[in-house]
Amino acid sequence: MWMIWLILIVTVPLLGLAAYGEWRNRQVDKYNEWKKQQEEQEKSGIPA
């Protein structure tokens, strides 16, 4: 029985970290995309 707990204790936080990392990457991608659009608008002289 303790083996199951050991496996859970190790894998659950790792899965959580992996999911969090994925989420962070998506947020950063969205932000970069938004930033690029803002800069393009400024270049073309359209007030944001």
Image (spheres, grey):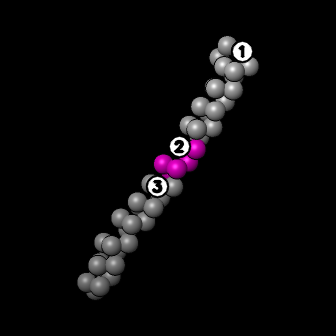
Q: Quadrant of the N terminus?
A: bottom left
What SS does tag 2 mark?
helix
The residue that disc 2 covers is: 28
Q: Mark 3 highlights which residue?
A: 21
Q: Residue pushed farthest left?
A: 2
Choose between 19 and 40: the one closer to the eye: 40
Residue picked out by circle 1 = 45
Residue at left offset 39%, top offset 66%: 14
Q: Is residue 41 magenta?
A: no
Q: In the image, is residue 41 above or below residue 47?
A: below
| Residue 27 spot, x, y in % from top left | 53, 43
Q: Which residues are magenta?
A: 23-29
Q: Is residue 11 above or below residue 21?
A: below
Name the element at disc 1: loop
Q: CA distance from mark 1 to mark 3?
A: 36 Å
The span from disc 2 to disc 3 (Cα, nearest Å) is 11 Å
Q: Quadrant of the C terminus?
A: top right
Whether residue 1 sits left or right of residue 12 in the image: it is: left
| Among numbered discs 2 and 3, the one appearing first in the sequence | 3
| Secondary structure mostly seen in the magenta stretch | helix
The part of the image, by quadrant, that contains residue 6 is bottom left
Residue 21 percent coordinates (x, y): 46, 55
Q: Is residue 26 above or below residue 39?
A: below
**Residue type at mark 2?**
Val
As for residue 25 lying within the magenta part, the answer is yes
